[in-house]
């Protein structure tokens, strides 16, 4: 892992014997992606109004220690709904739009 970019790491490796046509990019069995989201929580006053402090603060600033897979939301989010939002990312999705045009015809781009 010390020779890989900061946003890539290998968790396990196995020896493949007898298959010289193996392509690690196309023939991988599993790929796991992990992302971090930093956001400001919506804070409401006694009347239910969103407090203005939600529009700024240290959560807006990228730290020198932040990795390449962190995304800092420029707006406040209601974290009570975060679990529901994440469930929409779970399951089978077609990622053809994120693949080079030539590769769309070569391989199934629906992932679970």
Image: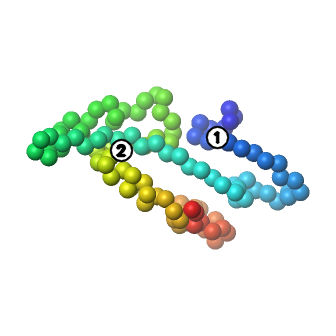
Q: Is residue 109 above or below residue 18?
A: below
Badge 2 marks a residue whose secondary structure is strand
Q: Which mark is residue 73?
A: 2
Tell me which corner region of the image, top left, top right, bottom left or bottom right, holds residue 109: bottom right
Q: In the rendered image, is residue 101 in sight? A: no
Q: Residue at 53% across / 65% down in the picture?
A: 92
The answer to which of 104 and 92 lies nearer the viewer is 92
Q: Residues within 10 Å of mark 1 (few under 14, many from 20)?
A: few
Q: In the rendered image, is residue 18 in sight? A: yes
Q: Which mark is residue 9?
A: 1
**74 relative position to 108: left or right:** left
Between marks 1 and 2, how big is the CA–CA gap? 25 Å
Q: Is residue 18 above or below residue 63?
A: below
Q: Residue at 38% across / 56% down in the picture?
A: 84
Q: Residue at 26% across / 35% down in the picture?
A: 56
Tell me which corner region of the image, top left, top right, bottom left or bottom right, holds residue 21: bottom right
Q: Residue at 14% across / 46% down in the picture?
A: 48
**102 relative position to 57: left or right:** right
The answer to which of 57 and 12 lies nearer the viewer is 12
Where's the N terminus, which quadrant? top right
Colouring method of the image: rainbow
Residue 62 position, x and y percent, is 40, 33
Specify the farthest residue to the right.
18
Q: Earlier in the sequence, mark 1 or mark 2?
A: 1
Badge 1 marks a residue whose secondary structure is loop
Residue 55 position, x and y percent, is 24, 39
Residue 110 position, x and y percent, is 57, 66
Q: Which mark is residue 98?
A: none
Residue 107 position, x and y percent, is 66, 67
């Amino acid at each position: 892992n010390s020779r890989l970019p900061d946003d890539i790491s290998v968790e396990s490796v196995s020896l493949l014997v007898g298959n010289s046509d193996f392509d690690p990019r196309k023939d991988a069995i599993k790929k796991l992606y992990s992302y971090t989201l930093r956001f400001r929580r919506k804070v409401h006053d006694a009347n239910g109004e969103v407090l203005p402090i939600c529009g700024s603060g240290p959560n807006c600033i990228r730290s020198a220690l932040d990795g390449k897979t962190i995304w800092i939301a420029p707006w406040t989010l209601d974290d009570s709904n975060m679990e529901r939002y994440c469930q929409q990312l779970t399951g089978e999705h077609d990622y053809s739009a994120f693949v080079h045009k030539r590769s769309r015809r070569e391989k199934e781009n629906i992932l679970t």
